[in-house]
Each structure stands twice: as C-alpha cells, then as structure tokens.
Image (cartoon, grey):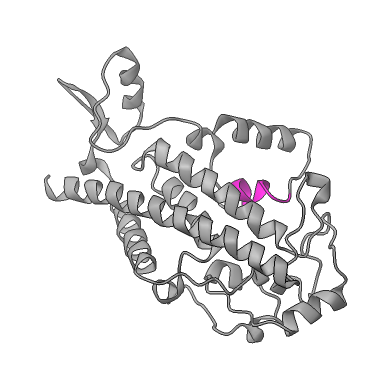
Amino acid sequence: MEPWVEAFRQRRTVRQKHPVHDFLFEYYQCKRRLIAEWHPPINVILIGDEAMKYLTYKQYTKQLNGVFLDPSRISSKLLSSLVWIGKLIEAALAKRSQHQCYGLHEWAMVYKPESIRHENTPLRLSPQEIEKVIESNSVCCTHYDAFRFFTEAAKPINTIQPSHEDRRVNEQFGCVHFNMDLFKWCYKLHPWISSELLLECFQLAVKARELDMRASPYDLEEYGYDPICIETAAGRAHYQEYQKNIGDEGRMLASRLLKESGKILKGQTNQ
C-alpha cells in the first residue's frame, strides 16, 4: 500500500489533484496510517519481540503462545457492521451479474447539471452530446451510492430508484462501484480483516475506478488514460469485457471476505 499512500500524501502536500486515484482515499475517508499497517488474519498467532507492538491495539490479546486478534474484543457496533456487510455480500453473490449499464452513472452525474461537478477536469464531449448519449440509452444503475449523485434531471431516467434500505435487493457484481466497495468494507472492519485481503481489494478498486473514469465523459488523457467511448458499439463491448473481469475477481475476493468474517463470528460464539 505504501506507494499509493505516499503518492497521495505528496499530492496533498503540493495541493495537486488526481481525478482517478484520489477518490479511493477521499470518498472512502480512509486513514492512510491504518491501511499502511500490516495486520494478520484472524486465528493467526504472532510470536517474537515484534509481536509485542500489537498489544498497543485493544483488539489484541497476549497468551503464553503469542499475540493474536481476540474475537471477544470486537465492539458491538463493529459486530453489527460485520453482520450487515456479510448479508449484503451474500445477497450479491446469489445474483446474476448485470452488464448493460455501460458506466452511464458517471454521465448521469453531469446530465443537465445544476452546477459543475469536477471543475478542474474537462469534459471530452459537449453538454449536448452528453444529453444525447443519456437519452438514447437505457440508464439502469443499481448502486445507491452512485445514484444519489445523479443530477435531479437524470434521476427519473434511471430504470430503478435504488435506496439505502433496498441495497440487498439491488447490489450485484456487474457494478464497478460495488466491487470498489469491497475495499471500503475491509477498511471499515480494520483490523479484523487481513491486510493481504485489504490490499487485493484495494488493487481491484484501482482497476474498477480506472475503468469507471475511462468510460466517463471526462477527458483524462493528461493523466495517461485513453477513453473507452461507450457512446459507440465498440466502446460498449470493450467496457463489458473489463466489467466482467472485474466482477469475476470481485466475487472471489468477496467470498474470501465472507470466510474471514465467518471466522470472527465463530470466535464470538466460542467465547
């Protein structure tokens, strides 16, 4: 994680913005110090002098055989989050992925806007061209956290009206934002989820975010990104290929997240 954390820190120092990568730190509001620290999976025992530093965390316990994450020390609030996240992921894993959105959620965020969304990042298409793309396609965003940033003019166009309460009904692994959220769930459950899994979910989030923005109406060539022109048939096919690969990887990582979560819950019942 360190190269990503350091690059973000350097940008903050000189007041520079990266419209693609900064999102993963700013939107998810993650503390850079925490994600740069290594923590073991549940049921792993740390030994030796270096293991003692983990006793500064209230979640760890020391016994004769070493230092380990103690499930009895998980807070009731975090335990509730663990159960909620687990049920959300289980519901998404049970669904067939949808691959017909073509990343139009980013377009819906700048459709007939009340104000400029990213004033420092130029658009590669005119407002009229963006309107034509939105109005000639079916907008079918299933992700509540993306939908809530739609312009007021775009919200009624979406085929569903997702809400926080019905996330289990709508969330699915064809959604690049839902795959990005796997990093958020790992971070929210820190330090109970292993740093190895957090890193892999972060790497997937980077891929998903880059696809998200390459398929957007923004001009990102200054940052080294060629656009995926979803306003064309070839661009939509290209987007779907990446989308499916990200979803497949997301399903594997989500299954591992459920497995680690299950060990924590099992530790609770064994207390």
- Residue 139's spot in the image, x, y percent? 63, 79
Q: x, y percentage for residue 261?
A: 29, 50
Q: Report if residue 75 is visible in the image.
A: no
Q: Residue 25: x and y, percent?
A: 60, 46
**In which quadrant of the rendered view does residue 132 lie?**
bottom right
Observer-nearest residue: 245 or 172? 245
Residue 4 visible within the image:
yes
Q: Is residue 68 above or below residue 185?
A: above
Q: Nearer the viewer, residue 149 or 242?
A: 242
Classify 163 as above or below 52: below
As drawn, is 82 to the left or to the right of 241? Answer: left
Looking at the image, which residue is at 59% across and 58% down? 242
Q: How many marks?
A: 0
Is the N terminus in the top left, top right, bottom left or bottom right quadrant? top right
Q: Quadrant of the C terminus?
A: top left
The residue range painted magenta reads 19-26
271 to the left or right of 128: left
Residue lying at 64% horizontally and 31% vertically, measured from the top left: 6
Picture quarter containing residue 70?
A: top left
- The answer to whether 164 appears left or right of 41 in the picture is right
| Secondary structure that dominates the magenta span | helix
Residue 144 lies in the magenta-colored region: no
What residue sits 53% from the left and 70% below the top? 143
In percent of width and height, residue 258 lies at: 31, 53
Identity of the residue furthest to the top in this view:
49
- Give the answer, above or below, for where 42 lies relative to 83: above
Furthest toward the left, the residue is 270
